[in-house]
């Protein structure tokens, strides 16, 4: 009785191990994007823009054209590329600091112009690469390297809901918030990513998928506990589902 | 009938697959891999459904799933 | 003979860029270069090109980074405070070896400054205001005609060396209108001359391995290797791309050194002095980086001293001193903050130096 391989390594993902920590969500998100790129058969048209953050080396893992961008400026770089080469499928892959702290201005204005782009936004509530500092999406009470006693609204304001903010902009076509805290959620995340890429293929305008992603190292939890924390804490602050 | 292949050298020991395998067919392998991590291993004798939950949640693409039925699309 | 049109320097640069094949322009409003962004807003779409008003000068330079990474001739323009916002982006463009043209219509500084002409951004442009050891090629026109002509040179140098090129104009040159002879020679606007395809560009990895546009090199020695590549390029540019204009250099006792608007005033000073039998000369750097040290090497044995005049408090002065290296005296006369040294002031200074000499 012949067993056929029904699930394995996507073509658009290089067959290498990654530098990400054990249980980090980036690895899953990278794979989902590669699967979507393969299934939509757009590998040879795709141009990725990597963030400055843990995923700055994303081009070591995706097997298609990719550009770096200065911290927070991925969407400006993406605008330049997409405007000059609309026939390419251009997406940015950004963390919460990149997209919703230093890059907020680029995020809002690129969305407001309705650039026909796809944004994969990894929300793991900390700055990972630099050692677990507070991010705009750090929860109240959450301890980080820069909120040792836990984030306090009076001092550091509230977790920023950038997706809900962007949903107000008429030119924005699609925003969904998904999570990676279980296989079922990962499947939903992939569906949202695929939708966001399809929108671009059909010239529908600005699409963004916010992905709640575990960061065991800087949440100082075991990988499995990190998934629980998303379900029990993060989702209360960042409800899942279609936002626009 | 189905089974999975685990790249034990690439496994970082996050153990996601263990917590989500509906049949509890994945366990910890005490023999360290090159990273010095106790990777996971597949318990051959169990009744694997080929549901691929383990592969879907694996952050490091360590798991390949083999099954006798038609193409599985997620 | 194509037509001669009365144009501001800003518009001349816009027209020159379009004719040189500029395919993508991103800008942001700032006086004194608003005529340029307005011109591009109208003309670029008509030429089938891309125009974007960005949300900031910082966004604009990063859009140019993207357009250049995708293989297009790309440009942005601003004025001093806006240029400061672009410095990080320019460092990235240099680090990723991307071709791009950046125009600075300089104004009085520091801080909010004013909107009058100045040359106080010389250091920022030639020493590079961003992080890391890099250089932009810096060109300094001194008329609307030259501003138009230099656009073709700028895009050509940017592509040839895969390097940022900065045009240093100023508020006066930018807004003053002068007749400009439009040339057909390199008019890309009409016949869309196919530029050399850029194999390194991000066009989608069809029939090739994926391209990566980057400046991050973490492995030991890797970033040093990139830097050595850049240094080799900069030395090549220093040897091949120096441009300057010289006047009465052979028998000059005193040589004025000035660029841009300042060179126009210095030129009339030299002509006046010559008419009174005083042996004055002028060196007008056109490339500020690479600084034209060749202009100083040809032995004008007669020269006793150089007088550098700038609309700043002595920035190009340092390059002249470095080049002359003590072999002659190098004097200075400068005013900034939007004020401009006058002919009378320069002549008075020359007389005080000539009698002392």
Image (tube, rainbow, N blue to C red):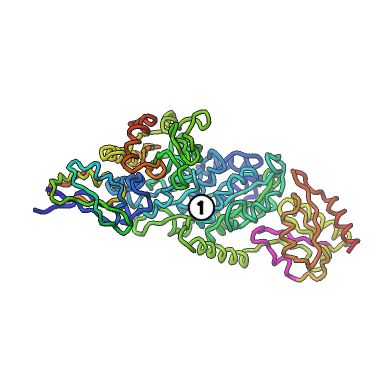
- Tell me, yes or no, whether the highlighted magenta stretch contains residue C286: yes
Check the image and name the residue furthest to the right: C355
Q: Where is residue A149 in the image (x, y as percent from the top left)?
A: 48, 35
The furthest residue to the front = B30
Foreground residue among C275 and B47:
B47
**At 47% from the left edge and 34% from the top edge, which residue is drawn?**
A150
Q: Can residue A219 be seen in this view?
A: yes
Query: Crowding at label 1, few (<14), some or many (≥20) Cα neighbours within 10 Å?
Result: many
- Between B63 and A191, the one lying in front of the other is B63
Q: Residue furthest left?
A: A1
Viewer-proximal residue among C74 and A125? A125
The residue identified by callout 1 is: C73
| Marked residue chain, label 1 | C
Q: Which residue is drawn at 74% across and 57% down?
A: C317
Left or right: C249 as drawn, with respect to C235: right
> For the magenta stretch, what is the residue range?
C280-298
Residue A114 x, y percent position in the rendering: 43, 36
**Image quadrant containing the N terminus of chain C:** bottom right
Q: Residue sitting at 56 percent across and 64 percent down?
A: C233
Look at the image and say whether residue C213 sits in the magenta stretch.
no
Above or below, comparing residue C203 to residue C85 in the picture: below
Q: Quadrant of the C terminus of chain C?
A: bottom right
Where is residue B58 drawn, in percent x and y? 28, 47
């Amino acid at each position: 009785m012949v067993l056929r391989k029904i699930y394995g390594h996507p073509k658009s993902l290089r067959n290498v191990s990654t530098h990400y920590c054990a249980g980090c969500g980036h690895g899953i998100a990278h794979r989902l994007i590669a699967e979507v790129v393969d299934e939509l058969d757009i590998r040879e048209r795709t141009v990725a823009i990597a963030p400055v953050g843990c995923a700055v080396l994303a081009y070591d893992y995706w097997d298609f054209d990719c550009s770096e961008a200065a911290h927070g400026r991925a969407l400006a770089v993406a605008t330049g590329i997409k405007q000059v080469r609309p026939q390419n499928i251009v997406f940015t892959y950004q963390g919460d600091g990149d997209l919703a702290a230093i890059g907020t201005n680029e995020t809002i204005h690129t969305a407001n112009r309705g650039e026909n782009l796809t944004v994969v936004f990894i929300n793991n509530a900390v700055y990972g690469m630099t050692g677990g500092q507070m991010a705009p999406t750090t929860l109240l009470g959450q301890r980080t390297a820069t909120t040792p006693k836990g984030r306090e609204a009076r001092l550091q304001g509230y977790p920023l809901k950038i997706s809900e903010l962007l949903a107000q902009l008429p030119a924005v076509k699609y925003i969904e918030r998904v999570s990676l805290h279980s296989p079922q959620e990962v499947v939903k995340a992939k569906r949202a990513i695929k939708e966001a890429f399809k929108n671009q293929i059909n010239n529908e305008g600005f699409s963004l998928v916010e992905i709640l992603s575990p960061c065991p190292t800087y949440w100082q939890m075991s990988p499995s506990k990190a998934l629980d924390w998303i379900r029990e804490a993060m989702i209360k602050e960042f409800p899942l589902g279609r936002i626009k | 009938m189905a089974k999975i292949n685990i790249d034990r050298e690439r496994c970082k020991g996050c153990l996601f697959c263990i917590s989500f395998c509906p049949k509890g067919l994945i366990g910890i392998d005490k023999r360290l891999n090159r990273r010095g991590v106790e990777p996971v291993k597949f318990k051959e004798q169990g009744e694997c459904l080929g549901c691929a939950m383990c592969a879907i949640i694996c952050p490091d693409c360590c798991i390949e799933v083999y099954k006798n039925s038609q193409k599985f699309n997620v | 003979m194509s037509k001669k049109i009365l144009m501001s320097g800003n518009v001349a640069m816009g027209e020159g860029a379009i004719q040189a094949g500029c395919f993508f322009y991103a800008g942001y409003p700032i006086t004194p270069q608003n005529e340029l962004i307005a011109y591009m807003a109208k003309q670029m779409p008509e030429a089938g090109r891309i125009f974007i008003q960005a949300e900031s000068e910082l966004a604009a330079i990063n859009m140019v980074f993207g357009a250049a990474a995708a293989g297009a001739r790309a440009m942005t323009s601003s004025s001093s405070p806006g240029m400061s916002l672009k410095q990080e982006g320019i460092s990235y463009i240099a680090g990723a070896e991307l071709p791009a043209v950046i125009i600075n219509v300089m104004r009085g500084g520091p801080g909010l400054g004013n909107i009058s002409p100045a040359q106080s951004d010389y250091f920022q442009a030639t020493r590079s205001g961003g992080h890391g050891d890099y250089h932009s090629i810096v060109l300094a026109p001194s008329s609307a005609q030259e501003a138009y002509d230099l656009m073709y040179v700028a895009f050509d140098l940017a592509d040839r060396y895969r390097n940022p090129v900065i045009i240093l104009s100023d508020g006066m040159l930018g807004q003053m209108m002068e007749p400009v002879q439009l040339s057909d020679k390199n008019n890309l606007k009409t016949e869309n001359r196919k530029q050399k395809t850029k194999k390194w560009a991000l066009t989608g990895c069809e029939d090739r391995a994926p391209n990566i546009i980057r400046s991050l090199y973490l492995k030991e020695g890797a970033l040093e290797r990139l830097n050595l590549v850049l240094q080799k390029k900069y030395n090549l540019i220093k040897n091949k791309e120096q441009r300057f204009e010289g006047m009465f250099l052979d028998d000059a006792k005193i040589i004025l050194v000035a660029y841009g608007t300042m060179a126009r005033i210095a030129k009339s000073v030299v002509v006046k002095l010559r008419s009174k039998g005083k042996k004055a000369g002028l060196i007008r750097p056109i490339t500020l980086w690479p600084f034209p040290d060749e202009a100083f090497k040809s032995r004008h044995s007669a020269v006793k001293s150089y007088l550098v005049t700038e609309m700043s408090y002595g920035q190009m002065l340092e390059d002249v001193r470095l080049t002359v290296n003590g072999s002659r005296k190098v004097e200075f006369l400068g005013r900034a903050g939007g004020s401009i040294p006058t002919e009378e002031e320069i002549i008075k200074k020359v007389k005080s130096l000539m009698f002392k000499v």
